[in-house]
Image (cartoon, rainbow, N blue to C red):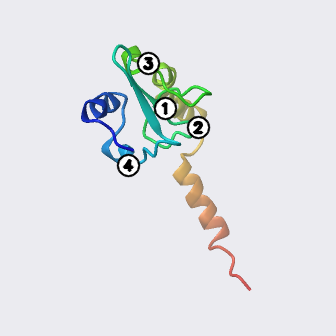
C-alpha cells in the first residue's frame, strides 16, 4: 500500500515507525485521511506499534483527537506492580526461575 509522505508524518505522530509502514497491506492494516480530522489507523490485530485503543471495528481514533486513553490508564501501572511485589516479600521472577532450574535440573531427555 502506498502511503503519502504527509500522511506518514501524521501516522508517526500516532506512534508508528518506518517498520510499521511495511505492514500496510490495504486489507489488515491500512489508514484513511480526512483534511479536518487527520489520519486514523485500521489495525484490528494490533500488528503495528500503535499502542492506544483500537475500537471493535478495527479503527483507531483520528490523529486530531490526540487520544491517549490506553496510556492514561496504564500510566504508572508497572511501577505500582513493582512496588507491590517488593511489599509482598516475594522473590523477583528471575530468582524463581533460577530456583526451579536448580531444583529440577535440565529438561528431560527424549526417548
Q: Nearer the viewer, mark 3 or mark 4?
A: 4
- Considering the image in quadrants, where does the C terminus appear? bottom right
Label 3 environment density (alpha carbons within 10 Å; few <14, some 14–19, many ≥20): some
x and y percent of residue 109 in the render? 68, 81
Q: Which residue is mark 1?
A: 78
- In space, the residues marked 1 and 4 are separated at their CA atoms by 30 Å
Q: Secondary structure at mark 1?
A: helix
Q: Is residue 87 above or below residue 111?
A: above
x and y percent of residue 57 in the render? 60, 28
Q: Which residue is mark 2?
A: 89
Label 1 environment density (alpha carbons within 10 Å; few <14, some 14–19, many ≥20): few
Q: Nearer the viewer, mark 2 or mark 3?
A: 3
Q: Earlier in the sequence, mark 1 or mark 4?
A: 4
Q: Which residue is mark 3?
A: 67
Q: Secondary structure at mark 3?
A: loop
Q: Nearer the viewer, residue 25 or 20?
A: 25
Q: Earlier in the sequence, mark 2 or mark 4?
A: 4
> Residue 31's quadrant in the figure?
top left
Label 4 environment density (alpha carbons within 10 Å; few <14, some 14–19, many ≥20): few
Q: Which residue is mark 4?
A: 22
- In space, the residues marked 3 and 4 are separated at their CA atoms by 24 Å
Give the farthest residue toward the right. Answer: 111
- In space, the residues marked 2 and 3 are separated at their CA atoms by 37 Å
Q: Nearer the viewer, mark 1 or mark 4?
A: 4
Q: Earlier in the sequence, mark 3 or mark 1?
A: 3
Residue at screen point 43% across, 47% down: 23
Label 2 environment density (alpha carbons within 10 Å; few <14, some 14–19, many ≥20): few
- In space, the residues marked 2 and 4 are separated at their CA atoms by 45 Å
x and y percent of residue 16 in the render? 36, 36
Q: Secondary structure at mark 2?
A: loop
Amino acid at each position: 500500500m502506498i502511503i503519502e509522505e504527509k500522511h506518514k508524518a501524521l501516522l508517526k505522530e500516532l506512534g508508528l515507525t518506518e517498520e510499521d509502514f511495511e505492514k500496510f497491506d490495504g486489507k489488515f492494516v491500512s489508514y484513511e485521511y480526512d483534511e479536518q480530522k487527520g489520519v486514523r489507523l485500521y489495525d484490528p490485530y494490533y500488528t503495528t506499534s500503535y499502542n492506544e485503543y483500537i475500537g471493535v471495528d478495527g479503527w483507531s481514533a483520528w490523529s486530531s483527537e490526540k487520544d491517549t486513553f490506553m496510556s492514561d490508564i496504564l500510566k504508572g501501572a508497572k511501577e505500582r506492580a513493582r512496588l507491590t511485589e517488593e511489599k509482598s516479600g516475594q522473590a523477583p521472577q528471575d530468582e524463581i526461575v533460577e530456583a526451579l532450574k536448580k531444583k529440577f535440573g535440565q529438561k528431560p531427555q527424549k526417548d
